[in-house]
Amino acid sequence: MTPEPVTPEQPAAGRWALITGATAGIGAAFAGRLAADGWHLVLVARDGDRLAAQAAELTGRHGVETETITADLSTDDGCEQVERRLADSPPVELLVNNAGISLNTPFLRSSAQDEARLLRLNVHAVMRLTLAALRTMTERRAGAVINVSSVAGFGAVMPGSTYPASKAWVTNFSESVGQSARPYGVRVMALCPGYTRTEFHQRAGIDMSKTPEWMWLGAPAVVDEALRDLGKGKLVSVPSWKYKLAVAGLRHAPRRLIDLVGRDTRGRIGRDRG
């Protein structure tokens, strides 16, 4: 049976977790929560100075060990750096694939280069790092992977955007791989939050000012529910009852209704988290 490495009732002090896109938003919330539970951390992001400050703060506050990897996961070199750590010791027992990008340029006005970068980060990097982690986890018959997806992946709710398509892939991929990893005592789960208060939309230049307050989630609450769902062995975690209802609607509502509520919030340019 798979151990319960990440439930609040059984914190796994002294084990190692690796988090991509770790310096902000959901990634930073995972880092803070896991450090408080006694996990040692490998933190991955592009901003080396911010990584160093985060690592020092977490070590000082919680007394855990931290490593940092400054890497752009939209590149082969960046993925290879993290793959090497996942194959190394001490073993990583929890991988959180959080780094991702959303473009605020509609597809018809986008460039092949920008779209390819989105797919390299949101899809290709997730595939590579999940595979690298599972190679060692299945040998040890212990471990877990959380791939951060999105409620947007359950329907084409952003007209002319490849972001929901990339997240649909992450969710489907995680469900499928999760089923094949279970016999080895390893869990793989897609985390599908709705609108979450992070730097993600601001850094992408997406205007969210008209989004109702009730639709927003807090990153720490998203992480808490994700870890509970992972402990329960779920393949997909959708935090908050309101987004569970939204997912049910996206799966079963008529296409015309989804087209009506879908809206394009994008402006000019996009950047990524992590």
Image: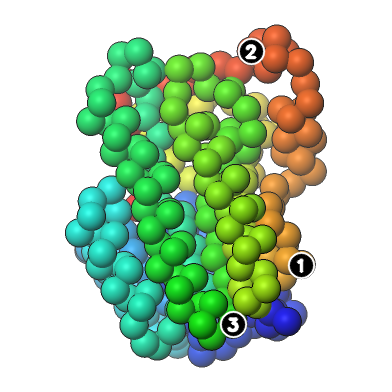
Label 2 packing within 10 angstroms: few (<14), some (14-19), many (20+): some
In the image: residue 132, left or right of residue 150? left
Q: Position of residue 28 (x, y in %)?
A: 46, 60
Amino acid type of the residue that numbered disc 1 sits on in the rendered structure? Lys
Q: Depth-wise, is mark 3 or mark 2 nearer the camera?
A: 3
Q: How is the image coloured?
A: rainbow
CA distance for labels 1 and 2: 34 Å
Residue at 60% over, 17% down: 262
Check disc 3: other Cα within 10 Å, few if <14, some if 14-19, many if 20+. Answer: some
- Answer with mark 1 or mark 2, whichever residue precedes in sequence: 1
Q: SS class of the residue under badge 1?
A: loop
Q: Which of the two labelled residues, at mark 3 and mark 2, occupies the earlier sequence position?
A: 3
| 254 versus 134 height, above or below | above
Closer mark to the observer between disc 1 and disc 3 = 3
Above or below 5: residue 178 = above
Q: Position of residue 35 (x, y in %)?
A: 51, 77
Q: Can you identify the residue that label 2 sits on?
A: 259
Q: Provide the residue designation for mark 3.
A: 141
Which label is found at residue 56? none
Q: Within the image, what quadrant is residue 6 found in?
A: bottom right
Task: Please name the residue that numbered disc 1 is placed on.
Answer: 232
Where the N terminus falls, by quadrant?
bottom right
Q: Residue at x 23, y 30 (%)?
A: 113
